[in-house]
Image (cartoon, grey):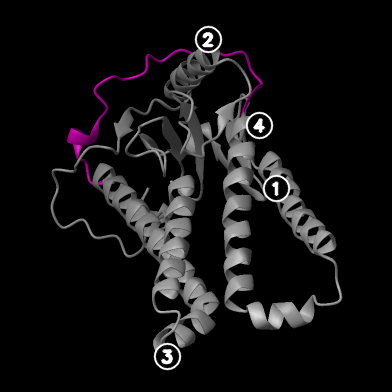
């Protein structure tokens, strides 16, 4: 979804630039080109707001189905239930997934293209001011400065992405998760809900699933990568071969059932209960 967003924004810039060329000689064209950088920023903010709203809707639906399970909706029980087994996963156990090198390179490449296009657009619309600004500077120096700036952005993105990883630790007493600066922990005896749903951003291609174990105060999530992300997808990948990763997830789910005695609920389904209206899209831990 991220890569598609970058492509859409890039297309918007091209369309705006095309409109500016058409009306270049008119009064409208002059005003339009002068305000083009600000218009593009407004479009970027509008697009970001739309994505945030869609994510809010996603979590709202998940929360509605969480509440439905608490109210006893057995239609949300998963068709395939993990068999309870504590023998398949030696403890302590650590599961790690992160953004792979290919994903980082794709993100950096698309981002640099977008930034280069935007910088070119700003330079073209403000060409008179830019000419006077760089009149005493040679063209190679300007080009090198732009390339250095883009490379700096690329290195920063790679650094940030490589630090973003999901680490799940499983012990005899509890299961915990850390993602960046966020940490959560659920003790086996405090667990109230075991559920699965499509990972945000993978609802259509169904390339990954998110499992969660909830208590009254916290939620621990872990991701099963069903298949590698496509070219236009930005997703985390396991640090081990995919087949081994799937086996580890199955063993972890079996351990969760054995330790908690909870069934697995499938929150991808539609609830059969009516009038389920959560107050927010955030997890209502008091309800679990």
Residue denoted by label 4 = 101
Q: Residue at x 41, y 43 (%)?
A: 201
Q: Quadrant of residue 15?
A: bottom left
* Label annotation for residue 88: 2
Q: CA distance from mark 1 to mark 2?
A: 34 Å
At mark 1, the secondary structure is helix
In the image, which is nearer the foreground, mark 1 or mark 2?
1
At mark 4, the secondary structure is helix
Q: CA distance from mark 1 to mark 4?
A: 12 Å
CB contact under 8 Å: marks 3 and 4? no
Range of residues picked out in magenta = 71-96
Q: Is residue 119 left or right of residue 135?
A: left
Q: Residue at x 58, y 15 (%)?
A: 241
CB contact under 8 Å: marks 3 and 2? no
Residue denoted by label 3 = 27
Dot 3 or dot 4: first in sequence order is 3
User: Measured along the vertical axis of the image, is residue 118 above or below residue 209?
Assistant: below
């Amino acid at each position: 979804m991220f890569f598609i967003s970058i492509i859409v924004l890039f297309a918007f810039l091209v369309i705006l630039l095309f409109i500016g060329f058409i009306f270049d000689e008119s009064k409208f064209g002059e005003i339009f080109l002068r305000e083009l950088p600000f218009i593009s920023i407004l479009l970027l903010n509008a697009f970001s707001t739309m994505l945030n709203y869609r994510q809010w809707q996603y979590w709202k639906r998940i929360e509605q189905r969480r509440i439905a399970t608490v109210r006893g909706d057995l239609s949300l029980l998963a068709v395939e239930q993990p068999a309870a087994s504590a023998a398949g996963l030696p403890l302590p156990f650590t599961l790690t997934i992160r953004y792979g090198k290919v994903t980082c390179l794709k993100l950096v490449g698309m981002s640099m293209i977008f930034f280069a296009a935007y910088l070119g657009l700003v330079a073209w619309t403000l060409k008179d001011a830019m000419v006077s600004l760089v009149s005493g500077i040679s063209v190679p120096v300007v080009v090198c400065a732009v390339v250095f700036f883009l490379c700096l952005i690329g290195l920063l993105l790679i650094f940030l992405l490589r630090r973003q990883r999901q680490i799940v630790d499983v012990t005899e007493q509890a299961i915990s998760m850390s993602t960046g600066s966020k940490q959560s922990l659920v003790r086996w005896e405090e667990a109230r809900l075991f559920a699965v749903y499509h990972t945000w951003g993978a609802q259509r291609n169904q390339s990954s699933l998110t499992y969660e174990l909830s208590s009254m105060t916290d939620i621990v999530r872990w991701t099963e990568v069903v298949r590698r992300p496509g070219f236009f997808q930005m997703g985390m990948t396991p640090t081990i071969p995919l087949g081994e990763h799937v086996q580890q997830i199955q063993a972890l789910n079996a351990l969760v059932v054995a330790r908690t005695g909870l069934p697995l609920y499938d929150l991808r389904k539609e609830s059969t209960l009516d009038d389920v209206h959560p107050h927010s899209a955030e997890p209502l831990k008091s309800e679990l």
